[in-house]
Amino acid sequence: MLRHASWMGMRENRDAKSEHKEQQGAVTAPQRMGRVRLSHPERVAIAEPPTTKGDVWGYYRALAGHVLPGIAGRPLSVLRCPSGAEGACFFQRHLMRGMPKSVRPVTAQGSEGPEEYFAIDGLEGLLALVQFGTIELHPWGVRTDRLDRPDRLVFDLDPAEGLPWAKVVAAAQDLRARLKGLGLDGFARTTGGKGLHVVVPIERRHGWPAAKRFAAALARAMAAESPGLYTAKLAKAARKGRIFIDYLRNEDSATAIASYSLRARRGATVATPLGWAEVDERLDPQAFTLTTVPERIRTSADPWAGMDELHQRLPASAGAS
């Protein structure tokens, strides 16, 4: 079964009769994908559980059909860990030197004039990023053809240290209900950390100012009604004992972790789409990992099926620009 398939052409150098189904597993020797070569597959990417660069390559290659719909054709920021997650990691948002053509430039207005960011459109670009030490994928909320028109909003529910998981679940369900009341469907996702995302697909009719106004107003309303539980303020002092409803991901060049992206942290966790029936106190976000998510995909229906076919507009109060 294929999702968002694209025709890439025939392989002239392969005999169809000799082909067989690939088995997912560790990559133990240098491999090629098109013009992308994986070097040092044995290099440790995540220490616990032991996860190599080859494992990361194998994961993204096997799950590309699920990863690419959320990142292809969008400007990207990536977390690169050339020496592994235990070493020096850094975010990269501008075009990298030496990247193949499968990682293409995207020119956008920065604070000091035009800046060159980057995007990918397929598997070759994704694997090129892995070859350069990428573990995490953080797309913008726009497509490259209209950088001023977001097509998704992201609310990041970030709990303070020690806050019970049940409160995060309640916050997500509360936010979902409020969105429903405004005529909008939201979709839940683990972040690979201790919080949850609620993602709202929207038509590309609104500019970033309207998107941010709407997200900020909703977050502030929740904080005003339940000040002991929620805050919409970024300051750490305001977040103590509360859930920070981060609406700041809904502005120009802001990013959020991609669905099915690995996280460069202990556990090799994965940001994983959820069905709302799963969002309860029994849910363990740490259970979604490099090893468990592929099996989940093979045996479960897509919890975000139909999301891309929704035509949702922000309420008129959000404005049109």
Image: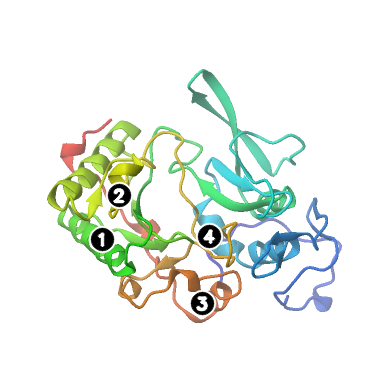
Q: Which of the numbered marks, if any, corresponds to residue 296? A: 3
Amino acid of disc 4: His
The residue closer to the viewer here, 138 or 161, is 161
Residue 313 position, x and y percent, is 25, 46
Which residue position holds label 1?
A: 171
- Tags 1 and 2 in contact by the CB under 8 Å rule? yes
Which residue position holds label 2?
A: 245
Residue 16 position, x and y percent, is 80, 73
Q: Quadrant of the N terminus?
A: bottom right
Residue at mark 4 to residue at mark 1: CA–CA distance: 32 Å
- Residue drawn at (21%, 41%) of the image: 217
Instruction: State whether residue 8 is above or below residue 280.
Output: above
Amino acid of disc 1: Ala
Residue 291 position, x and y percent, is 60, 74
The residue closer to the viewer here, 69 or 134, is 134
The reply, left or right, for residue 117 in relation to residue 97 is: left
Label 4 residue SS: loop
Looking at marks 2 and 4 on the same chain, the residue that comes earlier in the sequence is marked by 4
